[in-house]
Image (tube, grey):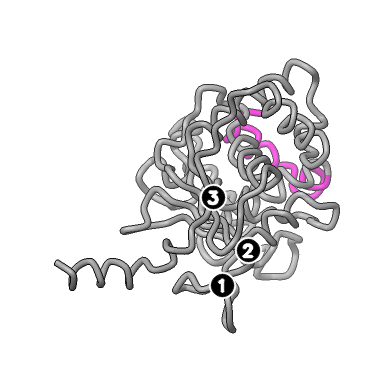
Amino acid sequence: MFFVIALIVIAGGYFLFRKGKPSVVNTESDLLSYKNLLNQEVDFYKKLDINSKSRFETLVFEFLNDVRIEGVGTDVTDKDRTLIASSAIIPVFGFPEWKYKNLTNVILYPDTFDKDFQFEGGSRNIMGMVGTGYMNGQMLLSRGALTKGFSSSAGKENAAIHEFIHLLDKSDGATDGVPENLFAHEYAVPWLKMMHQEMRRIEDGKSDINPYALTNEAEFLAVASEYFFEKPEKFERMHPELFKMLNRIFNI
């Protein structure tokens, strides 16, 4: 038995460094604190009308009550929770009843980490990932990438939104760039055709979409969606047809 326990601890040793508690939001001071942080940090929220802001707040609070957010080697702050919850809600704001049934935990690292979940030393280039296998139902995020995604220097990138797009894509059983739970099946083939056309443009140096989108269709969806949510006016100007399709996918 000791040998089995030891193996489990070695295989998942990073869990020993988790710090955090369930993100319960249930008092007036909690609500006010998170609303203030939304007003300070989240441009998407700030642009909404008063009724939509109220709905966004409700969805954020529900997310925080449903999903455990923990830190590895760091304490989780209310700002961290606000940005993580906002990253989750922004892509599904057009679907008020959406619940992330394939997510139980978000694990926050102080900085980038490597494939072995280490956040110290070299070869640390992972900003976020959706867990698979024994990590299924969990998301890992770098605080540095999370914070940058909501800063004025973010540009077209938001690593946390990127990972939640992967989670949405995965919710139909396949992480393939076609989030069938979000749009009608009839749009799947036109969307794939549009993706592949734009991927050829990226290859030819004729697109301003991050070349990481060439990795595969799932990464194209996540990268294009980051751009769509971070810089919607520019995205519409540079990619009008993609913009229309992503509007349809995210029901905005």
In x, y percent, where is residue 72? 53, 61
Question: Horizontal and vertical percent for residue 156?
Answer: 76, 54
Q: CA distance from mark 3 to mark 2?
A: 39 Å
The circle on residue 110 is 2
The residue where tag 3 is placed is: 193
- 3 or 1: tag closer to the N-terminus: 1
Residue 245 seen by the camera: no
Q: Please report whichever mark, 2 or 1, sits nearer to the chain's N-terminal start.
A: 2
- What residue sits 82% from the left and 41% below the top? 233
Q: Is residue 224 magenta?
A: no
Q: Residue under circle 1?
A: 119
Residue occupying image coordinates x 61% and y 27%? 94
**Residue plotted at (61% across, 35% down):** 89
User: CA–CA distance between discs 3 and 1?
Assistant: 39 Å
Residue at 70% x, 41% y is: 243
Percent across and percent down for residue 15 are 42, 61
- Front-lying residue, 46 or 240: 46
Work out whether residue 89 or residue 223 is closer to the camera in this orientation and state it. 89
Residue type at the position of mark 3 = Lys
| Amino acid type, residue under disc 2 in the picture | Pro
**Can residue 132 be seen?**
yes
